[in-house]
Each structure stands twice: as structure tokens, then as C-alpha cells.
Amino acid sequence: MARKQEAEAPARRRILRWLVWTGAAAGAACVIAAAYQGDEFLASSPRFVLPGSPARHPTLEIRGVKHASAARISAVFADDFGKSIYLMPLAARRRSLLAIEWVRDATVSRRWPNGVRVDIVERAPVAFALLPAAGGAFETALIDADGALLNPPVGAAFDLPAVRGIRRDQPASDRRERVRLAVAMLRELQRYAAQVSEIDATDVENLRLIYTANGRAVRLMMGNRNFLPRLTNFLSHYDEIQRRLPTARLFDLRLDDRITASTEEASSGG
């Protein structure tokens, strides 16, 4: 009898394992079926459909837009209207938003049952870029601290310095370096920034600026450091310089212990 029970034990264990695996498989099938049914419900139920169109979208909420094109932003979702928000590819929509001018960052989130919220972080211009154009002329664009060029919005006013030395064909990293140097200099010269009308950042080792001193526009060669001490030293001696060299318009301040004056016109690039 004992030997018979020992012989039957492996068979019982095999049956038990089979029952366990069968139960697990059945449970997994139920989970998969339920998930599939859930996907089908979320994808096809009219309750979750984004209503409207790019021109009229009652449940598409766009926030944070001041200068970016709201029409271009809503057009990003043109393929989503009339479909379940469950099917919307959020990452792809965000990438499309980041390609729109003035959009620095964007977040897209579903708002159940049938809404979408778009949060836009716009770029903040820090200067006007004087960009070389045909025939020796210049066109004006706004530029932010990342070096992104922006078209000035119609009707908007910005009180910002003008920066030369920036071109459309430059890598964004080069534009970023130049505009950040210019902004850093203005931050250091904060007390005198109102008298700075233009910064030339063509040479990152030698920033130049046009400064109004005693009502006269002069060009100052500032180098790439010690901006405030160099400017204050110049201003402390400017009355005497103006008395001795009334036609001087260009001043080299790169040597901290001296000021070199020239009669070159302030509009010159040399």
C-alpha cells in the first residue's frame, strides 16, 4: 500500500502543476481580454472624442501664449479632432509644438473624458539682433538667451539693446555665445545700461559698444572682462579727454591702466 501511494505521488504533483499552469494561463487570458476590451472602449467610445476643429476647439485648452501663433498651435492637433484623446500621441504633438516660433517648451496632457491641455512656455527675447542683409543693409530680429531668432510680433514693443555680430547662417551655439556675452556685459553695467544703444559681439574676445557720454555717441572697445571698472575709469576721465581731443569717437579700454583714443567715427566697424 505504501509503495502504491509513493507511485501515485508524482502523478498527483504533475496534475497539480497542470492545474496551476492552466489556472494561470486562464487568468492571463482574462487580463489580456479585459485590457483589450478596455483599449477598445477608450479608443472607440464617443465619450472620449476630442470635439471641434483647429478653428473652434471647446475642450482644447491652450495656456501661456502671448506671442506664439495660437492658430499654428491648434493646427498641430488637426488629426486628433473627432478621435478619442486616448489615441493622441502626446510625445509627437509636443515635438511639433517645439518647432513653432516663440515656443521654448510645451506640455501636452489629456483631460478626461474628452479634453486636452497645452501649456506653452514662450521664449523671452533679450536683445534685437541686427542681421546682415543684401546690399549691406541690416534686418532686425529678436533673439533670446538660447540664440533663437524671433520675428517681432505685430504691435508688440520691446525695450532691448541692439546686438551686432549675429547672422542667420551661424550655428545656434555661436549666436547663443554672443548674445549671452552681450547680456552679461549689460548686467555688469546695470547702472549705465540706459546709455548703451548698441553692442557689437562680432569678436567674442573684444566686445564693442556704442555709449552716449555727455550727449555724444562714442564707440568703446571693452575686451571680454572687467567691463564695469573699465567703463567707470573711462567716464571718470572723459571730460578731460573731451577737452583735449574733442573729435575723438573711438576708445580702446582693453588695457585697464590706460585709455587709447582715436578720431575714427563711431559708426565705423574698425
Image: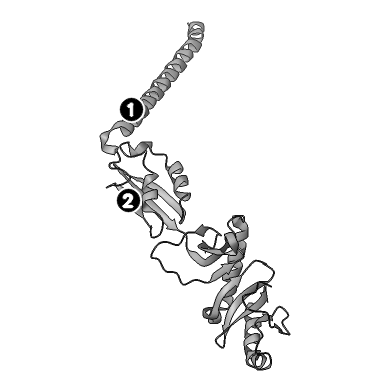
Is 8 left or right of 213, judged from the image as shown?
Answer: left
* Residue 93: percent from left, percent from top: 43, 44
Query: Residue 156: x percent and y percent?
Result: 40, 66
Closer to us: 142 or 94:
142
Residue sitting nearer the eye, 68 or 5: 68
Q: Residue 223 location in percent, x, y?
A: 68, 74
Amino acid at pointer 2: Glu
Q: How is the image coloured?
A: one colour
Q: How many numbered marks have been drawn onto this rendered protein structure? A: 2
Front one among 187 and 19: 187
Q: At label 1, which amino acid type do we have?
A: Gln
Q: Which residue is mark 2?
A: 61
Instruction: Say few, some or many: other residues with alpha carbon within 10 Å of mark 1 (under 14 / 14 to 19 / 20 or more).
Output: few
Compared across the picture, whether 228 is left or right of 112 comes to right
Q: Secondary structure at mark 1?
A: helix
Identified at 38% across, 47% down, the residue is 109
Q: Nearer the viewer, mark 2 or mark 1?
A: 2
Instruction: Give the vertical position of 141 relative to 193 (above or below).
Output: above
- Quadrant of residue 38 within the rendered picture: top left
Say which element carries label 2: strand
184, above or below 72, in the image: below
Sequence-first disc among 2 and 1: 1
| Residue on which the image places disc 1 | 37
